[in-house]
Image: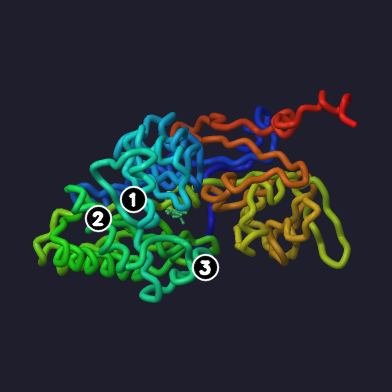
Amino acid sequence: MSKTVPFNKAKIEEILATYPTPFHIYDEAAMIANAKQLQAAFSWNEGFKEFFAVKAAPNPYLIKVLSEVGFGCDCSSHPELLLSESAGVVGENIMFTSNNTAAYEYQKARELGAVINLDDISHIAYLEEHAGLPDLLSFRYNPGNLKEGNEIIGNPEEAKYGFTEAQLFEGYAILKQKGFQRFGIHTMVASNELNNDYFIETAEIMFNLIVKLHTQLGIRFEFVNLGGGIGIPYKPDQKPVDITYISNGIKKKYDEIIVAQGLAPLKIFLESGRYITGPYGYLVTKVQHFKQTYRDYVGVDASMSNLMRPGMYGAYHHITVLGKEFAPKLHTYDVTGSLCENNDKFAIHRELPKIEIGDLLVIHDAGAHGHAMGFNYNGKLRSAELLLRTDGSVVQIRRAETVEDYFATLDFSGLTSFK
Ligand SMILES: *Cc1c(COP(=O)(O)O)cnc(C)c1O
């Protein structure tokens, strides 16, 4: 599939009059269309809900856009809970899936009425002591060697997350004994997974587990949260997941297992991040230098502080040169940022059209785990976030950082008396 951008060079030049590069820009219309498609695919399941993984793109404006389609928020920390609250997403529209969680974070989650998903059996008592028990609890299942992970999330057996199967039985028995009537269950074993069948298999494992828990403990589950991890095609030759195929496959297992055992209705929840915003965010950056040594380097005004996936994972991110979308790719470049780190490269040995200083480069699929992973190493400042609205207008949803932001935690006045 060829990768396209939802704007042309003239549009970006118009934006540049107000907002200098580098910036992230999100395509609202495409994001909403995709969100609606996900909901339509799972409309067979009454109560289906996607809880957008806030960590992927922690911006309250994006949360608001998604909440209007009916999405909730999956939060993992106190600040993410605050962001969700600021966008009007509260109560059981929040799933709080965290690990190694501090008491104050549980307290905030309880205050907001969030659905709490515990990562460990010892946290039943910890939650009770520090924040009180809600009437609904969910546990995160770690299937161990039952399921293979992948390189981003790792192998479940080596992963720090979740309960073992034996701990699930013990944990739900504790809840039952405490008089709980509302139960949920969760797992998250994939990251950036493009294999459709993987998600159907995960659902099957969870449905069978629910039957076992019901048989042994006599409890009924209100929901199963199948986690996030739906992949996106970063490379032009990769195929996107087929969400309808996944949903139909899950429905088949649901009918065979959950319905057949009399355990319907069971709400299906997802907490995807990447799939929801990833393809709809772009990092726009300008070429500021060209350098020829042992290789040809294109130096841009963004760096890995704006998008660290290529440096961190060696991840491929497609690049479009604006105004040269159809030019032949006859040149091979490394596209670099300005950090004193040799992995500060957006592309290595990439075939691109001939690039000149001043060209505008669009780095694709920067909408999830992009700006969010930004950092200030080397004194680099994080870029602005813009939203391309459905009506074609552009609004700034986060300004760029300034040096004042960078120095905000330093008190220089102490230096005069400091010896
Ligand atoms: C990171 C994470 C997600 C979202 O992952 P994506 O790959 O962005 O879909 C969801 N749930 C949990 C618990 C996570 O850690």
Q: Amino acid at mark 3?
A: Asp
Picture quadrant of residue 346: bottom right
Q: In whole angstroms, how far apart are the C-alphas of marks 3 and 2? A: 49 Å
Q: Residue 12: x percent and y percent?
A: 62, 38
The picture places residue 415, in percent across and down from the top left corner, at 86, 28
Q: Which residue is mark 2?
A: 174
Q: Which residue is mark 1?
A: 124
* Mark 3 or mark 1, earlier in chain: 1
Q: Looking at the image, is mark 3 or mark 2 earlier in the sequence?
A: 2
Q: Residues within 10 Å of mark 2 (few under 14, many from 20)?
A: some
Determine contact: label 3, label 1, CB under 8 Å.
no
Who is closer to the viewer here, 204 or 3? 204
Tag 2 secondary structure: helix
Q: Does mark 1 have its CB less than 8 Å from ligand 1?
A: no
Q: Nearer the viewer, residue 153 or 272?
A: 153
Point out the quarter of the image occupied by ligand 1: bottom left
Q: Is residue 419 left or right of residue 47?
A: right
Circle nearer the viewer, 3 or 2: 2
Q: Is residue 333 above or below residue 280?
A: below
Where disc 1 sits, the SS reads helix
Q: Which residue is mark 3?
A: 237
Colour scheme of the rendered structure: rainbow
Q: Are marks 1 and 2 in contact (CB under 8 Å)?
A: yes
Question: In the figure, 257 relative to 115: above or below?
Answer: below
Mark 3: which secondary structure?
A: loop
Where is residue 297? Give x, y as percent.
80, 58
Q: How far is mark 3 from mark 1, CA to CA?
A: 46 Å
Relative to 288, residue 122 above or below? below
- Using the image, determine if residue 101 lies above or below residue 59: below
Residues 52 and 352: in front is 52
